[in-house]
Amino acid sequence: MEKPIGILLMAYGTPRSLDEVEAYYTHIRRGRKPTQEQLNELISRYEAIGGLSPLRKITEAQAQGLEELLNEAGGGYRVYLGMKHSSPFIADTVKKMAEDGITRAVGLVLAPHYSVMSVGTYIQAALEAAQSYPSLHLTFIKNWHVQPKYLQAISTRIKGTLKRFPTDVQDQVRVIFSAHSLPRRILDMGDPYPAQLEETGNEVAKMVPLRHWLYAWQSAGRTPEPWLGPDILDVIREEHSKGNRYLISCPVGFVSDHLEVLYDIDIECQKQSNELGVHLERTPMLNADLDFLQGLKHIIFTHLTGEE
Ligand code: FEC
């Protein structure tokens, strides 16, 4: 029997319990332990969203759903999950693939936009691990921010979210497309990340179609160096000062419900909007919805047939 093609599906990862938060945070900080104050602050954010992030369960459902879709027309594909900051770590998953005898594999990160500091670090972790297994031929999909089914899935969710506003104000609603902020020094490296966020937003805006849309960065790290702006909280305040009272947050840089959406948008941005008297709604995340997973399947098939 022919060996299956392996799909190395890579995701951020999240702690399995509050006891694991310290190790997780230390890993994110590349081995530097957080202070007790930083740790308590992060734990309190997990508590505010119900104790833990749903990210792990959603990522697992995405992997399972994708494997089923890929194998719809017969077997031949096996999806392996590898996480950046929690187990199963990317390196362990690459090892497992090699031990299972996989010789051809495709790496795909569950984040649409490429930055050397985001997707680039996942690819680096996988490539480093793969060096020990020369029989494993591993190639990568670097970005998929304008893949039509992904854009369509976002557009559908914006149309649904617009209906939550009274009919007479729907043409005034402004959509804020956001992605995770990164240190501003990526701009000196000519990083494509900011341009890719705009490409996604502009394409979706054409599809819906939208009259008003803008861009923001969210969830900037708590480090002293400058991060990409404008921050979404400032954008909401700015829109309010211009008299705009109806906003949709569309966090296109993420695909799942998790801390950066459930806390940063649903709690922090919502609190500020309420105080200002702004009506803010958020588009539902793609999670393991079929329309999105069909898009991932398409991206993988296109990559494998060399059409990219
Ligand atoms: O739900 C969860 O448990 C996990 C949510 C989560 C996602 C996520 C995605 C991205 N991050 C990116 C970059 C950075 C950089 C730093 C950083 C720090 C954190 C911390 C937590 C955290 N991130 Fe994250 N990120 C998530 C969670 N992230 C918790 C630590 C506390 C804090 O700063 O809030 C700063 C590292 C440092 O201190 O040196 C940089 C990027 C993404 C989107 C792409 C991707 O998914 O990989 C970029 C989900």
Image: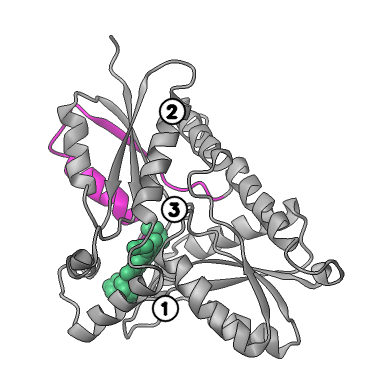
Q: Is residue 21 magenta?
A: no
Give the residue at x 12% y 37%: 132
Indicate the position of residue 30 as horizontal and vertical percent values: 19, 67
Which residue is the site of mark 3? 111
Which residue is the extreme one toward the top? 1
Question: Can you tell which of label 1 and label 2 is closer to the viewer?
Answer: 2
Question: Can you tell which of label 3 and label 1 is closer to the viewer?
Answer: 3
Indicate the position of residue 102 as horizontal and vertical percent values: 24, 25
Give the residue at x 54% y 63%: 251
Indicate the position of residue 61 as horizontal and vertical percent values: 40, 42
Q: Is residue 292 visible in the rendered structure shown here?
A: yes
Indicate the position of residue 31 as horizontal and vertical percent values: 15, 68
Q: Which mark is residue 227?
A: 1
Whole-angstrom CA distance, mark 3 to mark 1, is 19 Å
* Res. 196 image quadrant: bottom right
SS at badge 3: loop
